[in-house]
Image: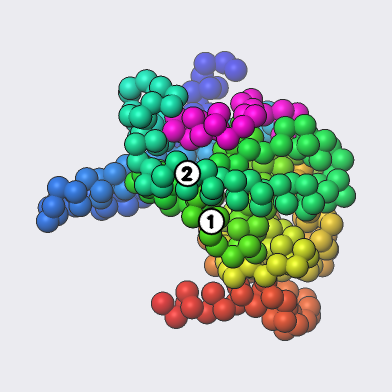
């Protein structure tokens, strides 16, 4: 690209993202207190502000990326094709829990900005030093979690469910799940600004869950493990990138960070459906609004098209079916929503306007839980 052309393109991109960056800057600045009662509170607030700044940068960097891709359709097309290939084998493959736990400790050190070298097995390693459980209890929890994980891997994730390509890749490099002590999870939450009972690390076959999960009800543990393993399976199939083709056939890639997340909603929906299909009744639904949207989407377009889109990341067929049944432009409007509650309101309005009887959805146990949790959230 010629120098002048590149300069103009960058200026246009900066102009497009500038107002959003300034707004996020004001939000972050407001989170840093001028004076707080204790040094610990000041540090915690400042850390949270830094986390928000990082997230804002990710959002706006992606806005610039999408702007540039729109100006260079050939790049968007290549990105679409590359994402569709999925991943034959993760970059980092672990073969046992010991290797994966070393990875957990390294991830924590990285999140905390540690400059000291991580020595595997060292008593001073951050993750090891923070553990409250004894080695014996942690080993017992690990054994229990691995048993639950095998149930999902060996009996729930069949070839019919995952599809031939994803099943082959998944079976070739099965996930390794480690149960981390609650103190490790809290240290990670303090470093990153978010507490998660389970996480899949893209680029690896490693999943972490809280060791305390071993003592929860079977249905809840299995649903959580199914949720995280679904993330891994989707990563292998290309589903970590949500994308579609518009009416002209042009490639559209959804930002990796957005106002609401159709990938998380479908993950939680499928995890709940798997658990209930195998005789378990999880006690709750995560990502309530997102899951509700994806449940409605599944009712409109069908289970199979949505599942294929989830594992491949290509929502073109889902877009076609949704627009056909709820009106042209519905899918694009849904994906442009700035929040999950907005997406929920939009799709329910479209469903009602199309004459779809959604009252029967209340009898579905997953949607009934979502409605109940949404009512509590709105009351608060």
Please indicate, yes or no, whether residue 245 appears anywhere in the rendered image: no
Residue 234 in the image: state x and y as whole percent. 71, 43
Residue located 55% across and 22% down the image: 5
Left or right: residue 138 compared with residue 153: left
Name the residue: 78% across, 47% down. Answer: 154
Give the residue drawn at x 51%, y 34%. Answer: 101
Specify the farthest residue to the top: 2
**Can residue 110 be spotted in the picture?**
yes
Q: Which residue is mark 1?
A: 213
Q: Secondary structure at mark 1?
A: helix
Relative to 75, residue 145 above or below: below
**Which quarter of the figure is the C terminus placed in?**
bottom left
Which label was assigned to residue 136?
2
**Residue range highlighted in magenta:** 80-107
Question: Which label was assigned to residue 9?
Answer: none
In the foreground, 122 or 31: 122
Q: Does 59 appear above or below 290? A: above
């Amino acid at each position: 690209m010629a120098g002048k052309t590149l300069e103009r393109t960058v200026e246009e991109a900066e102009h497009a993202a500038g107002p959003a960056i300034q707004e996020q800057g004001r939000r972050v600045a407001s989170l840093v207190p001028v004076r707080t009662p204790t040094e610990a509170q000041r540090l915690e607030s400042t850390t949270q502000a830094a986390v928000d700044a990082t997230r804002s940068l990710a959002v706006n960097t992606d806005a610039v990326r999408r702007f540039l891709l729109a100006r260079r359709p050939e790049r968007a097309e290549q990105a679409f094709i590359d994402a569709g290939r999925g991943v034959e084998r993760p970059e980092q493959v672990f073969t046992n829990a010991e290797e994966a736990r070393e990875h957990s400790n390294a991830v924590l050190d990285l999140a905390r900005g540690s400059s000291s070298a991580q020595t595997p097995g060292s008593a001073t390693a951050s993750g090891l030093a923070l553990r409250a459980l004894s080695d014996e209890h942690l080993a017992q929890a690990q054994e229990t979690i691995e048993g639950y994980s095998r149930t999902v891997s060996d009996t729930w994730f069949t070839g019919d469910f995952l599809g031939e390509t994803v099943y082959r890749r998944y079976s070739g490099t099965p996930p390794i799940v480690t149960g981390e002590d609650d103190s490790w999870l809290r240290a990670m939450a303090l470093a990153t600004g978010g507490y998660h009972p389970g996480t899949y690390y893209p680029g690896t076959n490693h999943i972490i869950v809280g060791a305390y999960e071993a003592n929860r009800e079977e249905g809840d543990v299995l649903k959580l493990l199914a949720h995280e393993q679904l993330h891994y399976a989707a990563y292998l199939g290309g589903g970590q990138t949500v994308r579609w083709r518009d009416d002209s056939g042009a490639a559209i890639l959804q930002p990796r960070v957005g106002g609401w997340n159709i990938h998380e909603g479908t993950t939680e929906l499928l995890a709940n459906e798997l658990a209930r299909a195998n005789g378990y009744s999880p006690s709750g639904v995560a990502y309530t609004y997102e899951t509700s949207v994806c449940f409605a989407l599944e009712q409109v377009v069908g289970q199979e098209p949505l599942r294929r889109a989830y594992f491949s990341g290509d929502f073109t067929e889902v877009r076609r079916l949704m627009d056909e049944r709820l009106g042209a432009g519905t899918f694009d409007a849904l994906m442009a929503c700035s929040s999950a509650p907005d997406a929920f309101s939009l799709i329910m309005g479209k469903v009602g306007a199309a004459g779809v009887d959604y009252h029967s959805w209340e009898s579905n146990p997953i949607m009934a839980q979502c409605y109940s949790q949404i009512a509590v959230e709105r009351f608060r």
